[in-house]
Image (cartoon, rainbow, N blue to C red):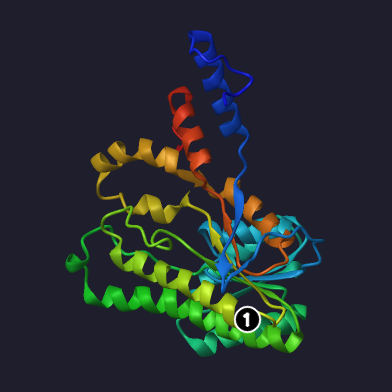
Amino acid sequence: MPDQGFTNEPSAAGNQYHVLRIIACLFTAPARVESVRINGSKFTELEGVNTMTTIVITGSTRGIGYGLAKAFLEKGCNVVINGRTQEAVNQAVSQLAAVDSAERILGLPVDVAMFDQVRVLWRSSQERFGAIDCWINNAGIANPLMDFWELDAGQFRSLLETNLLGALYGCKVAMQGMLQQGFGKIYNMEGMGSDGKVRVRGLLPYGLTKAGIAFLTNALAIEAKGTGIVIGAIRPGMVYTDKLATQYKDRPDEWERVKKVLAVLTDRVETVAPWIAQKILENQVSGVRIRWNTPARTLKKFLLLPFRKTDPFD
């Protein structure tokens, strides 16, 4: 049965109206919080009151991790950030202190690939702020963009230790601590490869670790069922950071070719992070995947690309 708003026979005016309706829907289509089905039970988003006070984010001296720390701080939370070097931590803490009081910020140099250091991160955060409401495993590195057989074998170990072991250690430490305090949320940062699809050639080791993190999150949600601990995933899509830019620093010609496509596929940290932070604060149930870059959002950016007046990477 045809839509009552359209005639049976197509016309130029009708087609234009149809296109306008589709575009209007795309422009208003929100990013979404997905649910996942675990052991036959479907978990969905539940809006709740923001009672969260302390957030620990690994790998948060720059990029999306830093953006999340800043967003949570702006929303009144205590934040604990970490990086591998004291210098990077000090710089990030100094920048965040311009947003809110330094009393609400704790920065620690931690290598997430070292289990004992991850435990120190939990204990130090607890000593400073008391209970830890949310732990976000964000720390991660990417391999140079090339076929994996051309990579140094040592890079495989670094990727696995930082991305996968780091998330495993973070989940273990946070679960043990949250079970003792009786509540908490754990989120893992997903990325290219988390859905099992190969979208970019040359990132095989990185995608492998992200596929592992997706399995870790789903399996942990099953094992944590009934504990009261919320397990979730964050899928921000491709976010423009200094890490992305440096992949092309020695290939300026290739950068000129790909940056128009990246302008459609990527978003700025300052756009994505506040939305993700709010969804984490609101969500109260396990099994949620917070996803920013939906197909509708990407199509909208494709449609608007010819009308851009400035380079999005300037």
Q: Locate the N terminus and report the quarter of the image it occupies.
A: top right
Q: Tag 1's secondary structure?
A: loop
Q: How many badges with numbers are in the image?
A: 1
Residue placed at 51% from the left, 83% from the top? 169
Horizontal side, residue 152 vs residue 88: left or right:
left
Residue 134 to residue 171: above or below:
above
Q: Residue at x 52, y 39 (%)?
A: 296
Q: Please name whichever residue, 44 or 289, is drawn nearer the observer in this view of the structure.
A: 44
> Residue 258 occupies which quadrant of the picture?
top left
In percent of width and height, residue 26 lies at 56, 33
Would residue 303 appear left or right of 228 to someone viewing this image?
Answer: left
Residue, far left: 150
Quarter of the image with the C terminus in it: top left
Judging by the rendered image, the residue that carries numbered circle 1 is 224
Give the x, y percent position of residue 125.
68, 80
Say whether residue 26 is visible: yes
Q: Is residue 229 left or right of residue 252?
A: right
User: In the image, residue 88 lies at what x, y percent?
Assistant: 52, 67
Q: Residues within 10 Å of mark 1 (few under 14, many from 20)?
A: some
Q: 124 or 16, which lies in front? A: 16
Identify the amino acid type marked 1. Answer: Ala
Q: From the viewer's perspective, tell me whether residue 228 is left or right of residue 49.
A: left
> Which residue in the rendered view is the most extreme toward the top?
12
**Horizontal and vertical percent position of residue 158:** 35, 76
The residue depicted at 48 percent of the width and 43 percent of the height is 295
Relative to 76, is 110 above or below?
A: below
Residue drawn at 22 percent across, 66 percent down: 148
